[in-house]
Image (cartoon, grey):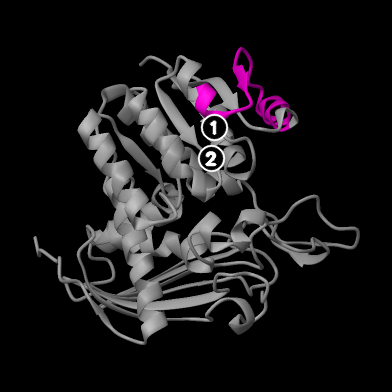
Amino acid sequence: MKQIKVLMVGAAFSADLHSDAYARLRDKAKIVGIADKAPERIKELADRYGFTDYEVYDDFNTAIEQCDCDVVDICLPNFLHHDAAIAALKRGRDVICEKPLATTVEDALDMVQTAEKLGRHIYYAEDWLGCPALTKARALVDSGAIGDLVFVRARESHCGSHSPFAQTIKFCGGGCMVHLGVHPVSFMLAMKNNQWKELVALTSGGGEENLIHRTMEGEDWAGAMMKFADGTTAILEANFVTSGGMEDIIDFYGTKGCLHADLTFSSALKGFSIPGFDYTVEKAEVTTGWSNPAVDEKFNLGYVNEIEHFMDCIAEQKEADIGLRGIDGYEALKVINLIYKSAREGIKIVNDELEVK
């Protein structure tokens, strides 16, 4: 298999997550360019993961136009996803795009339709679908180990986004549901092949109505109940009001058993520290006292398997698995916007486009 030549646009938080994966997949991927408006971030990122022989760019449009690459990995703030993806697709490149696919449903649809028209692929970076624990959980569910799956409860939550862009809806597309809830939403849609039937939702409302983050335009708590075409129901939650580190919790209930997954606090390590550990888990405010330091957080959260799948798909020029395609990112964003509509108007949303397969 040839090395896939990767241009990374963005060198901050999500770029670090992807870079860790590329560093483990050197036989399949080579970073040939990194673009970021802050050159010191590029050097820090490259030095951290041992990348060499790459081109440096201070503008993503210039990078996309000039860099000889196979794929453009978009690790930019949400509001730049659309423009970077369209530029890359028109340049004849495949695209890897971090979640959410865009800030508006219209932009997401434009990305998907442009890729289809130009014969390129968008790979939607939903890391839960590369998570080893959830891959095993889905296999156990599919095997019938807990009988027929009837109910799923899933949430991602932490104390609040570190990004300054997360404070303003036009830059990010919403609040905690589009930032964090996109994971449980995307996961459930992937499990059910986007065949959802109805939903009803509540959110904290944003701004002064928020539980804690009253300077944030988007909501800091959101919950949705969904029903799928096969009768399975789900409760999906996201919030920015959780202290102590990021929580990724997924519970599966069947007619003959249940299954519980804890992606962030299920470390084999447990320790007590007076001065504090260097790192315990993402978004933990303190590392003193008792904690469960993560062993290999980025691998266990799915980034390595996700990126490896994309490299294999690009090499064979094929679509990704269900849940990891551009169309899936579009469907997830559609659902999230309907969650907002349901909460805003106090109504149940019925999927009039449902075609049971």
Q: Nearer the viewer, residue 185 or 293?
A: 185
Alpha-carbon neighbours of circle 1 within 10 Å: few (<14), some, or many (≥20)?
A: many
- Between the C-alphas of marks 1 and 2, the distance is 6 Å
Q: What residue do we see at 76% from left, 64% from top?
A: 285
Q: Which residues are magenta?
A: 41-63
Q: What residue do we see at 39% from left, 56% from top?
A: 104
Residue extending farthest to the right is 275
Would you name the residue on which mark 1 appears? 9
- Judging from the image, what secondary structure is the residue with disc 1 in? strand
The C terminus - image quarter: bottom left
Q: Amino acid at mark 1?
A: Val
Position of 200 with respect to 159 (left or right) is left
Task: Classify 61 as above or below 269.
Answer: above
Q: Nearer the viewer, residue 265 or 81?
A: 81
Considering only order in the chain, which callout, 2 or 1, is on the residue closer to the N terminus?
Answer: 1
Would you name the residue on which mark 2 appears? 75
Q: Amino acid at mark 2?
A: Cys
